[in-house]
Image: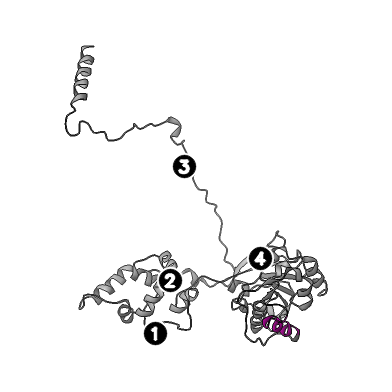
Amino acid sequence: MDILHGIESKALALRESPPPGNVMEMAEAQADIELAMERPLFTPAVKPVITDLALQAGEEDIDAQALFDQVVLDKAHLIRHIHHALQDKAQITLSELVATQPLQQGLAELVAYLGVHSKFIESHRSVLAELLDLSLPVEGMDLTKTGVGQFSARYGFLGKPIRIRSRILDPGVQVVPGISCPDITLDADSFSQLKLEVRRVFITENETNFLAFPCVSGSMIVFGSGYGWEALAKARWLERCEVYYWGDIDTHGFAILDKLRKYFPHVTSLSMDRDTLQAYSELWGIEDKPQCIDLHRLTREEHELYNDLRDNRIRANLRLEQEHIGFDWVRARLDLLR
C-alpha cells in the first residue's frame, strides 16, 4: 500500500509540473489479440492421382508451330543497345535509336524503350501519337491510318481483334450442343470460317431488335457495326446466303446500306421503305447532321426515298429509328420471305 501511495503522490506532483520531453514511448496503442478460431484448420496435403493411360497418336493435322511462336523480350539486350548508342553522345532520341536498330517485336519493344506499361499507352494514345510521329522514320508508319482508333495500325502494332456478335434464329441449327439459338461473339477471322446450315442472314443496328428478333427457319442475325463492314467482309460464305439489312430510315441508314453493298452487292433492305415510314409517322424524329453525299448502290425506290430525306422534301432532318417499328409489322415482312 505504501508503494501505491508513493506512486500516487509522485503522479500528482508531476501533474502540476510535467517534465520536459517525452516521458514514455509505446510501440503500439493497442495489444495484439489472437483468437483461437482465427487460426486456420488443418488441411491434409492432396496427393495427386496419376492415371496410368497409354497416349495414342492422333490423326489431326495441327500446326504445332504456334506452341513455339512466343515473344520473349530481352530487356538486357535493349539496355545494352542504349548503352552502346550513348558511348559517343550524351543523349539520343527514340528516332535515332530505332534507326540504328529497328523494332523487331512491335509494341512490346517500344513499351520497354519508353519504360511505361501498356495501360499508359492505351490512356495516352493521342499524346504518344505526336511523339511517335516526330520520333519514328516515315517509312516505318502507315500515314493513311489516322486518329486514335487507328493508333495500332499506323505504327505497325497488333491491335485488339474486331469481334462480330450473332444469334441463331432457328432452334434446329445447332452451333453449341444443348443450347438453342445461342448468342455468340467471335473474332472476325473465326466468324469468317463458320460453316452453318443457314440460308438467310439478317443484320440490324439496334441491340434490342437484335435480341428480340423473331425465330426464322434457317436464319441468323448479326449485330451490325455502323460503317465498319471490313471485318464482316471477310466472311465470304455470306455470298451464298440471302442477306437483309434493317437500319434506320434516315440518310445515315441508307449510307450504311450503301457501304455494306460495296462488299455484298446482293444485300436487300428490310423495312426501310416509304410504306414503313408513313405507317409510323407519329414516331418520326430528327436526324442530327444528315448525309449530303450521293449514293450509287441503292435501288431505285431506295434512292428516291434517300433523296427525299436528304433534300428535306418530306420534313426537315426526318428520321425513323428502327426500334420504333412494331414487330407485328416486321413479322408481316418476314412472312413475305417464306
**Label drawn at residue 125:** 2
Quadrant of the image containing the N terminus: top left
Provide the residue designation for mark 4: 207
Mark with earlier residue (4, 3) = 3
Of badges 1 and 3, nearer the viewer stands 1
Q: Which of marks 2 and 4 is nearer the N terminus?
A: 2
CA gap between label 4 and label 3 equals 50 Å
At mark 2, the secondary structure is: helix
| Quarter where residue 275 is shown | bottom right
The reply to whether callout 2 and callout 4 are in contact (CB within 8 Å) is no
Q: Which circle's residue, 1 or 4, is located before the other in the chain?
A: 1
Coordinates of residue 314 in the picture (x, y in percent) = 73, 79
Choose top left, top right, bottom left or bottom right for residue 282: bottom right
Specify the amino acid type for callout 1: Val
The one of 11 and 205 positioned closer to us in this rendering: 11
Choose mark 1 or mark 4, whichever is in front.
4
Residue type, numbered disc 2: Arg
Give the alpha-carbon distance from disc 2 to disc 3, as whole Å.
49 Å
User: Badges 2 and 3: C-beta atoms under 8 Å apart?
Assistant: no
Tell me the number on the disc at residue 199: none
SS for callout 1: helix
In the rendered image, the residue lying farthest to the top is 1
Magenta span covers which residues? 301-313
Give the label on residue 138, or none.
1
Inter-mark Cα distance, 1 to 4? 41 Å
Residue 224 image point, x, y percent: 64, 72
Q: Element type at marker 4?
A: helix
Which of the numbered marks, if any, corresponds to residue 45? 3
